[in-house]
Amino acid sequence: LLITQALANLLINAAQVSPPGGRVTLSVYPTTHLGKPFMAFAVRDEGRGIAAEHQGQLFHPFFTTKPQGHGLGLAVTQNIVMEHGGQITAHNRDSGGAEFCIMLPLLK
């Protein structure tokens, strides 16, 4: 349930920053990190991307670039992911927009 909330937060953010008619994509795929198996969930948008001056603040509580935002969505998302032993990253895409990726460890 909490992972669903984390993904919903990312998808809602992506939809809000994408232009009208823009595409939001969720990709799910297995990967490895430091020799261990993970499942990756990548959310891509077609928005303006992440401003360089905001990159280091994205996951800080109460940081927002939205006029009506409260700045807790990404901080809560990061906490959920970390509580599940995973990690979350964010970067700008070469083709425009941003990508947020949640990686969760797979049990073996």
Image: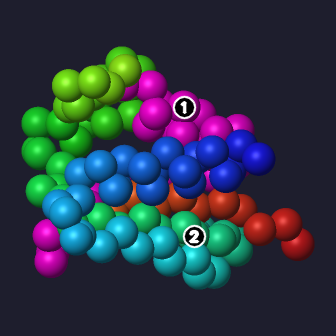
Q: Earlier in the sequence, mark 2 or mark 1?
A: 2
Side of 69 where 27 appears, left or right: right
Q: Is residue 97 magenta?
A: yes
Residue lying at the far right of the rendered structure = 108
Kindly identify the amino acid type of the residue bearing the numbered disc 1: Val
Amino acid type of the residue tagged 2 in the rendering:
Ala
Query: Which residue lies under the disc numbered 1?
Result: 76
Q: Residue at x 22, y 42 (%)?
A: 55
Q: Is residue 89 left or right of residue 41?
A: left
**Where is residue 12 shown, x and y percent of the image?**
42, 50
Could you say which is closer to the camera, residue 89 or residue 70? 70
Considering depth in this image, is 67 or 87 the residue closer to the camera? 67
Q: Is residue 10 above or below residue 92?
A: above
Q: Residue at x 49, y 45 (%)?
A: 9
The residue wearing badge 2 is 40
Mark 2 and mark 1 in contact? Answer it, CB < 8 Å.
no
Q: Residues within 10 Å of mark 1 (few under 14, many from 20)?
A: some
Above or below 29: residue 107: above
**Magenta residues (range):** 71-98
Q: Is residue 60 visible?
A: yes
Circle number at residue 53:
none
Locate residue 11, reporting x and y percent.
Answer: 45, 56
Dot 1: element? helix
Q: Residue at x 50, y 77 (%)?
A: 27
Name the secondary structure under disc 2. strand
> For the residues marked 2 and 1, what is the alpha-carbon distance in whole angstroms?
18 Å
Position in image of residue 79 (x %, y %): 59, 34
Q: Look at the image and tell me whether residue 35 can be seen.
A: no
Res. 22 image quadrant: bottom left
Q: Residue furthest front?
A: 20
